[in-house]
Image (cartoon, rainbow, N blue to C red):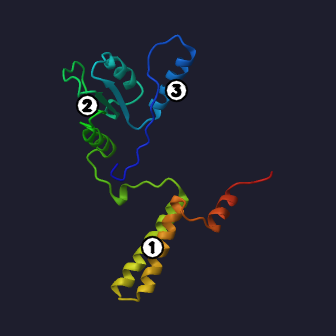
Amino acid sequence: MDGILFRLYDTAGIRLTEDEIEKEGVLRSRNVIKNADIIILIKDIFENGSEELFDEIKGFTSPEKIIRVTNKIDLERNLIEKSDVLISALTGEGIENLFNKLKQITFGNSQYTEQSAIVSNIRHYECLKKARENLQKSLISINNKFSGEFIASDIRNAVFNLGDIIGEVTSEDILNNIFAKFCIGK
């Protein structure tokens, strides 16, 4: 969504149950919720009781990370319980509001900047650094009116480095890096 990767998990409902299999599903749902960055709590317009579930989920995370969504607004408009976003999955009404709410929680009032980017993998960081250096070299070449071959070479190298991150490029260096970090056969 707008270049932002969201990974969604559809969990089992959280409720009291005597069924052992359902209990396991509820336990797994609670674990997913505890580790989630954002929780989308969806109920349809005819359901009640989501306030109790909301209160339980607040025990796992901060309320600001929970989006209460009411679905099926194409069928009924009389709301009893609080909802952050009203949608109709059938007609698509309100979906854009849900996307906006997700982005608002993700970024808050800040804007994405180069300084706010986080790269958690050292190899990715090195690839990004090399790609940036190549692009800066290409800009210098353009400003100095160098031949197009030099400019293209720097841009090609930048693309190669970015390709290393997403797996489009396999190189001997990556394999050497992997085998240098792991002891195989002992």
Q: Are marks 2 and 1 in contact (CB under 8 Å)?
A: no
Specify whether 133 is left or right of 23.
Answer: left
Disc with the residue nearer the chain's start (2 vs 3) = 3
What's the amino acid at mark 1?
Glu
Q: Quadrant of residue 118 in the image?
A: bottom left
Name the spot of residue 113 as percent of width and height, x first: 33, 58
Q: Nearer the viewer, residue 136 or 101?
A: 101
Q: Secondary structure at mark 2?
A: loop
Residue at the spot 49% in from the left edge and 74% down from the top edge: 157
Question: Alpha-carbon neighbours of circle 2 within 10 Å: few (<14), some, or many (≥20)?
Answer: some
Reading the image, the residue beneath label 2 is 84
Q: Residue at x 47, y 71 (%)?
A: 158
Residue at figure coordinates x 19%, y 20% from the top left: 78
Disc 2 + disc 3, Cβ < 8 Å: no
The image's mark for residue 28 is 3
Q: In 3D space, how far apart are the residues under numbered discs 3 and 1 (Cα atoms)?
A: 45 Å
Q: Which residue is mark 1?
A: 133
Residue type highlighted by circle 2: Asp
Q: Nearer the viewer, mark 2 or mark 1?
A: 2
**Of residues 129 and 39, the one drawn nearer to the viewer in this rendering:** 39
Q: Position of residue 42 (x, y in %)?
A: 34, 28
Identity, as a three-letter code, of the amino acid under mark 3: Arg
Figure check: 185 above or below 22: below
Residue at the far left: name it.
Answer: 78
